[in-house]
Image (cartoon, helix red, strand yellow):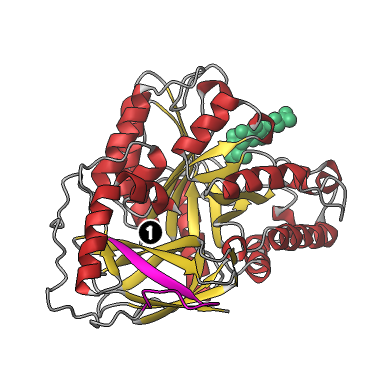
């Protein structure tokens, strides 16, 4: 779905590659950049398998300037307030998903993914939870995590399971709160409950003032390392990045040390105040692009007038919806992540005697009642993004599975819009909830990023 925009902007190259691949009789299609740069943030980020998102407020979905920018530029959405505890469970055991669902439906129906924010946070607790302590609160917390993650099961790319649990200052320890007072294991309990409720969502810990190597970020680093060593399910760390004038000099090094623990890193709430903000936006984006496991960037709002930092003008669009200099710096940095002059030749590097079978593994005419899958590859030295198009045959699909065979040495590192079993060799992919149904003759897409050489990936599809 990310690649939809890429495909559009690269349609000439894609067409040429399609024809060439068809001539080779292979199901592999190489998508290379014909004229370089993508022209929107989402499409530019997708070229390197990343996303570009924004925090969205349900109350603004009627504002056409806002919605036009959202729809055009962003391919990931975070609800700014609508999935928080006070919004989703205003009374104990009574759940209210109206505004969260509105944002989710807008995102999904416009081909965007969602970050869920946030299951447990000491702020924006509903009043009834604020008044609780101890085992009663612990039970209420876990029930909240289970209920909300279950409601959104299969629809969330990544959840901020726990938000802002570490103290500011030099202690490197936890922040005091009624959540913390239920016992130091509350964070891992929340992650386990979230995994049980929605095994398809990546589970993140999210915090601020963690943008450089400091006592707070080191405290979190130690927690993540401990979780990984004990098998507590954590997949990602969110760096909010509410900045002024610049990012810390060790911003990239800090992202990298977390990535080296085996978690994805995400920039989750970026906004930058101050006169140097345009440069700083470029630097932050370049830092993310330089870290393989940095999956994407979300800005905390769209226009300056949408920002929680009233009057500081910290976003990429001005109050009228015009692109600012910072926007151009971000776009340039996103496009530079994947060379605008392709390192891959315009003629495929797939040998003319294909290593892929001369009889395509995917039928060229769809099986009635079945489905076909075709792979588009955006390769670079040492890695690739594969977009897989799943097309229903003569009957609609209500669930599908795709089997891909990766060449030796290639490995999946990151995927979207499908869940995988395995990361090397034969990898199977199953639909997520929102792309389970595909009408007869229609298509849906999922994608994955990998390391190694992805050329020669084959794919087969089956209805399930
Ligand atoms: O504070 C900035 C962000 C820091 N990290 C976590 C984020 O969730 C947080 O977002 C902000 C929202 O941008 C604000 O919109 O969280 C604030 C709450 O702490 C949000 O502010 C609240 C106001 O405090 C409420 O009075 C208001 O009813 O927004 C609510 C909805 O507009």
Secondary element under disc 1, as helix, strand or loop, is helix
**Left or right of 402: which side holds 140?**
right
Vertical order, 239 against 15 (above or below): above
Q: Is residue 415 visible?
A: yes
Magenta segment boundaries in residue numbering: 362-377
Is residue 151 within the magenta segment? no
- Nearest the viewer among 81 and 175 is 81
Q: In the figure, is residue 461 to the left or right of 200?
A: left
Question: Residue sitting at 13 percent across and 60 percent down?
Answer: 347
At x 67%, y 36%, the residue is: 58
Q: Quarter of the picture for ligand 1?
A: top right
Quarter holding the C terminus is bottom right
Query: Which residue is depicted at the point 81% across and 44% down?
Result: 130
The residue where tag 1 is placed is 259
What x and y, as percent, mark residue 92?
87, 52
Image coordinates for residue 269, horizontal then vertical, percent: 51, 39
Q: Nearer the viewer, residue 67 or 303?
A: 67
How many neighbours does mark 1 have within 10 angstroms: few (below 14), some (14-19), or many (20 or more)?
some
- Coordinates of residue 291 in the picture (x, y in percent): 31, 53
């Amino acid at each position: 779905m990310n690649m939809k925009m890429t495909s559009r902007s690269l349609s000439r190259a894609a067409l040429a590659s399609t024809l060439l691949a068809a001539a080779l009789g292979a199901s592999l299609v190489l998508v290379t950049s014909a004229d370089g740069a993508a022209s929107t943030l989402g499409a530019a980020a997708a070229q390197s398998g990343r996303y570009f998102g924004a925090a969205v407020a349900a109350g603004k979905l009627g504002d056409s300037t806002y919605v036009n920018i959202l729809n055009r530029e962003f391919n990931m959405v975070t609800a700014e307030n609508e999935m928080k505890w006070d919004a989703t469970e205003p009374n104990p055991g009574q759940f209210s998903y109206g505004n969260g669902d509105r944002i989710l439906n807008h995102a999904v129906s416009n081909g965007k993914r969602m970050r869920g924010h946030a299951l447990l946070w000491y702020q924006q607790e509903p009043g009834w939870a604020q008044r609780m302590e101890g085992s009663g609160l612990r039970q209420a917390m876990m029930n909240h995590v289970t209920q909300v993650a279950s409601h959104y099961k299969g629809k969330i790319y990544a959840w901020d399971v726990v938000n802002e649990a570490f103290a500011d200052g030099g202690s490197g320890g936890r922040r005091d709160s009624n959540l913390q007072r239920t016992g130091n294991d509350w964070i891992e309990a929340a992650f386990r409950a979230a995994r049980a409720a929605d095994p398809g969502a990546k589970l993140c810990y999210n915090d601020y003032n963690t943008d450089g190597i400091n006592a707070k970020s080191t405290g979190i680093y130690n927690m993540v390392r401990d979780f990984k060593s004990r098998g507590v399910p954590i997949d990602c760390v969110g760096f909010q990045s509410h900045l002024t004038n610049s990012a810390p000099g060790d911003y990239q090094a800090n992202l990298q040390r977390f990535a080296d623990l085996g978690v994805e890193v995400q920039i989750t709430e970026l906004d930058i105040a101050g006169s140097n903000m345009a440069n700083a936006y470029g630097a932050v984006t370049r830092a993310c692009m330089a870290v393989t496991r940095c999956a994407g960037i979300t800005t905390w709002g769209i226009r300056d007038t949408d920002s929680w930092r009233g009057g500081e003008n910290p976003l990429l669009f001005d109050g009228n919806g015009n692109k600012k200099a910072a926007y151009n710096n971000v776009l340039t940095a996103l496009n530079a992540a994947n060379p605008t002059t392709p390192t891959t030749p315009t003629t495929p590097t797939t040998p003319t005697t294909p290593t892929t079978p001369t009889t395509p593994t995917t039928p060229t005419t769809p099986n009635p009642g079945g489905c076909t899958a075709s792979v588009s590859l955006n390769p670079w030295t040492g890695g690739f993004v594969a977009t897989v198009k799943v097309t229903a045959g003569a009957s609609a699909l209500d669930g599908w599975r795709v089997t891909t065979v990766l060449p030796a040495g290639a490995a999946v590192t990151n995927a979207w819009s499908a869940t995988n079993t395995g990361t090397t060799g034969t990898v199977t992919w199953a639909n997520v909830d929102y792309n389970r149904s595909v009408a007869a003759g229609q298509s849906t897409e999922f994608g994955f990023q990998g390391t190694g050489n992805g050329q020669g990936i084959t794919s087969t599809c089956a209805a399930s």
